[in-house]
Amino acid sequence: MIKFAPRASFTKPAALVLLTSEQAKAAKFTSSVNPVAAAVNAALGSGRFEGGKGEVLPLLVGKCLVVLFGVGKEKGLTMASLRVLVRRALMFGYFRKAADIELVPHKDEAAVIRAVMDAHLLGTYAWKKYITRKKDDKTVDNKTLHIAAAEKAEYGRIARVAACANFARDLVNENADVTNAEYLEKTVRGVLKGKSGFSLEVLGPRELKQKKFGLLLAVNQAASKEPRVVIVRYNGGKKGEPYTAVVGKGLTFDSGGLNLKPSGSMETMRCDMSGAAAVIGALKAAFELKLKKNVIFAFGAVENAIDANAYKPGDVFISYSGKTVEIGNTDAEGRLVLADVLSYVIARYKPARVVDLATLTGACVVGLGNDYAGLMSNNDGLAAEVLASAEATDDRAWRLPMYPELKDMIKSKIADIKNTSNQRGAAGTMTGAAFLQSFVGETPWAHLDIAGTAFVDGDSRMYFGHGATGYGVRLITDLLEKS
Ligand code: BES
Ligand code: ZN
Ligand code: ZN
């Protein structure tokens, strides 16, 4: 939880003070009666603390631990690096355990406060369900951060969206065998419970067969679990106003199929439904923020498993759209699932524009790393809007080119199109996107390849710990609100 008070109280068991190098040396707090404020002033005046980036000076005043924490020069301090710095401070052992922390930002400015909020709400999130020896450290769930700043209405929005991102993270972090397609459907039903202004369409195995989702069903062929396509039509806007469709890849586990992934590449593949999780997180945010827009939230949830029924490389399947697809590699399954869901959503709901989120290619991780999603689009206007929201929310994205020749790389000799490139290793992220593009037609469409950004495999990255990042919830919510 986060609480605001315009001035620092210095009465909490622990206080964290952020300072810039320019202001660090000047005594800052007027109350010399309060022993904590007096000690901080003395420390600031002592010349022992410069406020340099990452510089730390702990003080113990009675029972109160104060840590002066430098953020460096204000000029050139990005809000992303502020998020990283504040998270680092909040992860210090003592603060980790404290149920109450007071934080005095170096500046009472909306961008700074939002960064501090993200650092706390997203930065201290941890997935601990399966740790039986619970340490007494308090994560975002059970600690209160008191920020010495004037409260603003937009902060409530930031907190809600962060909670929805964490909701998505829980879905990704949970065991793949738990978060199966049926579970994701139930999760959506849970989000919708008690709400109005929407309609829900759920396609199970029977409907999917009857409607001929040939690609999606091929991927799920060897799974012991049922597939689902879940579509929520959210009617927050006026009647007749256009719909934006947000579509997620929901591979509840991606073993690679018969083109089995090697050890080292499979262990994190419960993250392959991160696109669907982002869609669910954004759906939850839409209700919580009472979003005044019309939106289609959709995902296809299947498992890419292996057994004797597994779909086979070299075989051809007929998509929902009627286009036939040769399977070059069973591990390029996400585009198959998305192709069917995208063409169905476009045909049935006729959205004015579509954004999809998918952990689609390892090539995207190679090319852009883990801090930028790949953005590909057939529409410059939509791409610009997505990039603006990426910038505003720090769910970063970088646009990659889409050009006609990419189509030549996914030609098949025995079908209309192939799910892999004929030029192995070249432009893998864009050929994946080109495959999707051939199923969206003229509809303005933006594709976010989140293979690198959705999940942290390791200690931490930026301001995220190990596991799911909730990538996309902030970006999509901002995009829907703004346009
Ligand atoms: N789910 C993977 C992509 C992925 C890789 C997500 C790393 C997260 C982290 C996807 O289904 C896949 O395996 N793609 C293949 C495509 C290839 C066979 C054309 C890949 O990237 O190797
Ligand atoms: Zn795969
Ligand atoms: Zn996959």
Image: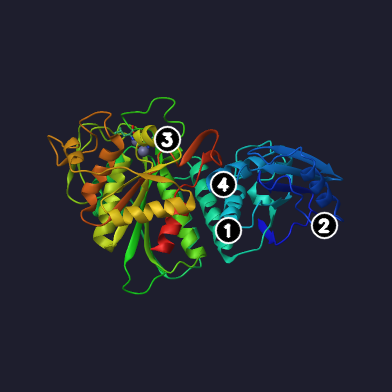
Rendered position, 315 above or below 123: above
In the picture, the disc for residue 75 is 4
Circle 3 or circle 4, nearest the eye: 4
What whole-number distance in Å separates the C-alpha atoms at marks 3 and 4?
27 Å
Label 3: few (<14), some (14–19) or many (≥20) C-alpha neighbours in 10 Å: some
Measure how far apart labels 4 and 1 are at the Cα level: 16 Å
Ligand 1 is located in which of the four quadrants?
top left
Question: For the residue marked with disc 2, what is the amino acid?
Answer: Ser
Q: Could you tell me residue 373's position as x and y percent?
A: 40, 43
Sequence-wise first label, 2 or 1 = 2
Q: In which quarter of the image is residue 48?
A: top right
Mark 1, Cα crowd under 10 Å, few <14 / some 14-19 / many 20+, is: some
Res 226 visible:
no
User: What residue sits right under mark 2 in the picture?
Assistant: 31
Figure check: 149 above or below 116: below
Q: Do the residues labelled 2 and 4 touch (CB within 8 Å)?
A: no
Separation of residues labelled 3 and 1 (CA atoms): 29 Å
Residue name at image x 37 percent, y 28 percent: 261
Task: Nearest to the eye among marks 2 and 1: give it.
Answer: 2
Residue picked out by circle 3: 369
Q: Indicate which disc residue 110 carries.
A: 1
